[in-house]
Image (cartoon, grey):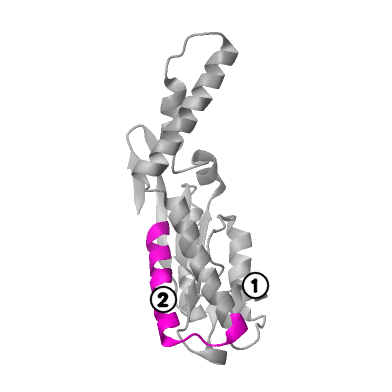
Amino acid sequence: MTVSAPNAAPWVLRGVYASRDYRIRRVLLREITSLTAQGVPTVVVGDFNCILSLSDKRGGAAFMERADRREFRDFMSRIGLVDLGFFGPQFTWFNIQLGSARVWEHLGRAFASPDWILRFPTCRSWDIVCDAWRTPVRGDAMHRVSHKLELAKRRLRRWNREVVGDIFRRVEGVETAIAELQMKEDVEGALSEDGMGDLRGLLAAHHSLLW
């Protein structure tokens, strides 16, 4: 998707759902490489279906260094995209199996080109801050700065409460519940059917809150 606005240069958003077959995934990586080489600010978000390290996996067979994982790591280094990181539960996918057959993996990732990051240092509340900062205020320089900082803070709090619906508190609550179920499984073994149902519902809720 090419995103454009009046009097602003376009940028590209690419959603990814990569194949588990590294040969098919290789075609996708080549396409992303070609797109990024055009010099347009770019964001790539989605499921790359590839883990990179031991910390990306829990359960199942032991993590092994493989050619496809090295290829994906080399792609990230070569193309110059920056991993935007994540917040929330460590793992974004699991195989819905019980006991020792359960596997968790971190597959969802978001990358951006350096020029996109410079252009959008924040993407949620910058307009609110700008509007508050443009509000006319009388007084000396220190008073004006102090007043505008306070005004921006109040408007951000109101935006968080009224527009976002206090999403940060809701996300934190869902993440705490997910972590508790993961810890329970680590200590007590496989979750019950009811526990599994709760976990699936929490993961779905977490996904909807973030996206």
Quadrant where the image shows the C terminus: bottom left
Hey, what amino acid is under mark 1? Ser
* SS of the residue under disc 2: helix
Hey, what amino acid is under mark 2? Asp
Say if 29 sits above or below 187 in the image.
above
Residue at 39% of width from left, 35% of height from top?
A: 8
- Residue named by callout 1: 55
Q: CA distance from mark 2 to mark 1?
A: 25 Å
Mark 2 or 1, which is nearer the eye?
2
Residue at 49% of width from left, 85% of height from top?
A: 191
Q: Magenta part mainly helix, strand or loop?
A: helix
Residue at 51% of width from left, 20% of height from top?
A: 147
* Residue 31 position by quadrant: bottom left
**Mark 2 burial class by Cα count in 10 Å: few <14, some 14-19, many 20+:** some
State the mark number for residue 198. 2
Residue 105 in sight in this render = no
Percent position of residue 34, x then y = 48, 59
CB under 8 Å between discs 2 and 1: no
Say if 135 sits above or below 10 in the image.
above
State the mark number for residue 143. none
Percent position of residue 139, x then y = 52, 8
Question: Which residue extends farthest top?
Answer: 139
Percent position of residue 3, x then y = 35, 47
Count of marks placed on residues: 2
Which one is nearer the viewer's eye here, 110 or 116? 110
Q: Which residues are magenta?
A: 186-211
Q: Is residue 109 magenta?
A: no
**Mark 1 burial class by Cα count in 10 Å: few <14, some 14-19, many 20+:** few
The reply, left or right, for residue 153 in relation to residue 83 is left
